[in-house]
Amino acid sequence: MRTATLWAALATGLLSMLLLGDGIAVNLLVVAVPATLAVYFAGVRAGRRPRAWSLVWGAGGLALLVVPSVRAAEWPSFLAVVTALAAGSLALHGGRTWPAVLLGPLGVFTAVVTGPAWAWQGLRERAGGDRSRVGPVLRSLAVAAGLLLVFGVLFAQADAAFADLLGALVPDVSTEDGPWRILLLMLGLVGTLAAARTAAAPTRWDRVPVPAGRARGRAEWALPLIGLIVLFAAFNTVQLAVLFGGYDAVLAETGLTYAEYARQGFWQLLTATLLTLAVIVVALRWAPRTRPGDRTLVRAVLGTLCALALVVVASAVRRMDMYVDAYGLTRLRISVVAMELWLGLVIVLIMAAGVWGARLLPRAVAASALAAVLAFGFVSPDELIAERNVERYETTGRFDLEYARGLSADAVPVLDRLEEPLRSCALRDIDAELDEERDTPWYATSLGEAEARRLLEERPVAPEVREPTSGPTCGEPEWEPEPFLR
């Protein structure tokens, strides 16, 4: 272990304690810098060199950490951070097979226990195996911290300008959140040591044996799939008529309303897409591919099934679009549509693997998931939800005010376009939340929150809406509360 690895891990722990206690934004990237350096130093010391795909996973993970700094909504930021951790773990382990891609994101957690022990062994080796030489190093760090604290307080009390500068640079750490800060210190330190330990000696998930499936006869595996293809074709014939505008005839025959028809089948079609992927995986294990004729048959049958599955994906997305037209867009609705679109992309990748080979398929699927989460965070889901619902209000006069109040500050630029008093009614709760978080440090404030504050300062929420004196003051337009996908 290099000394630089230990210092970088310690710096990560201290920055986590000082910066992450007030929330996450650009501070997450600041903390990631020494953690990345610790990983790099540990890998170089062990004789490892970063490969192309490891750089892809690492760069993708760092890009995902940018999402909390630009978006105020917590749910896409949480998804981005979790995916960034998975991408970072995959970068440390490498690998190109399905076990490596599926288990690699979890592999770094196995080093949570061995990482600190590895670091302690490194400390003893740096001290020449003598525990008595480790103590002076730790004491010197404590003395340095004490001197900085004492003289920093004295200089801050002696000069107001220096106190302002110090207050802007140094986080305000109180005794009340002391346990929380200590926990952040331990998480940053132990997490970085676990990552560095993994970089020095990763688990080789590529070596996990995967037993090959026993090839079946043509009739045994192909006949069920051909029957499934016929069923898909019959279903998609009806769906194509609907997709190209045959709503009136379909609704007249079924007796359903526009929204009921859309709601009726979305979840079933989403489940059908997932089951289709499972069927393809099982068929690939059973299908014989030793002769050219067998390989041609496999490509023809599974390629046809994939093509028909794409029509199912399009039908599911169209149904949700119909339902959004009737009842508006919500977080769950936009999430499941994004999931369905990604499943469609996976099917396209499987079709491409059938033509050019499946060697890159595991990493391509993982890269598509990373890119999908990154795009989902940067497009600002809350802003899209507000945009769609405001457009619906301008067209139909219906607006789900209760749901709009629960959106994040990312929705403020769109909700700001509403006329009064609806604008103030929609922005009241967001404005109150931003007012409560006004003392949040700059490094824990996202660009979305900063933009929302600027707009609300230019056009404040109406006083009678902010603090109603008696009775309801928000005249709510007509809207239809409904439980589906809320």
Image (cartoon, grey):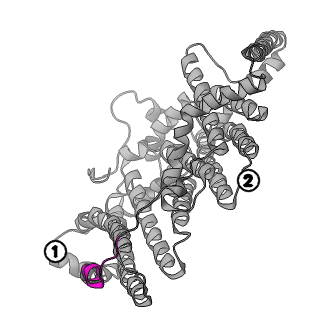
Mark 1 residue type: Thr
Tell which tag, 2 or 1, sits nearer the viewer.
2
Q: Nearer the viewer, residue 355 or 61?
A: 355
Residue denoted by label 2: 49
- Asked whether the beta carbons under mark 2 and mark 1 sit within 8 Å of each other, the answer is no
Q: Label 2 to label 1, Cα distance in Å?
A: 62 Å
Q: Residues within 10 Å of mark 2 (few under 14, many from 20)?
A: few
Residue 416 visible (yes or no): no
Q: Quadrant of residue 37?
A: top right
Q: Nearer the viewer, residue 58 or 150?
A: 58
Q: Residue at x 65, y 60 (%)?
A: 53
Mark 2 residue type: Arg
Most frequent secondary structure within the magenta stretch: helix
As drawn, 265 above or below 306: above
Residue 213 visible (yes or no): yes
As drawn, 355 above or below 432: below
Q: Residue at x 51, y 78 (%)?
A: 352
Q: Nearer the viewer, residue 370 or 261?
A: 370
- Residue 327 falls inside the magenta stretch: no
Q: Is residue 232 left or right of residue 306?
A: left
- Residue 224 falls inside the magenta stretch: yes
Residue denoted by label 1: 254
Say which element carries label 2.
loop
Q: Quadrant of residue 448?
A: top right
The magenta region covers 214-225
Give residue 463's position: percent from left, percent from top: 49, 33
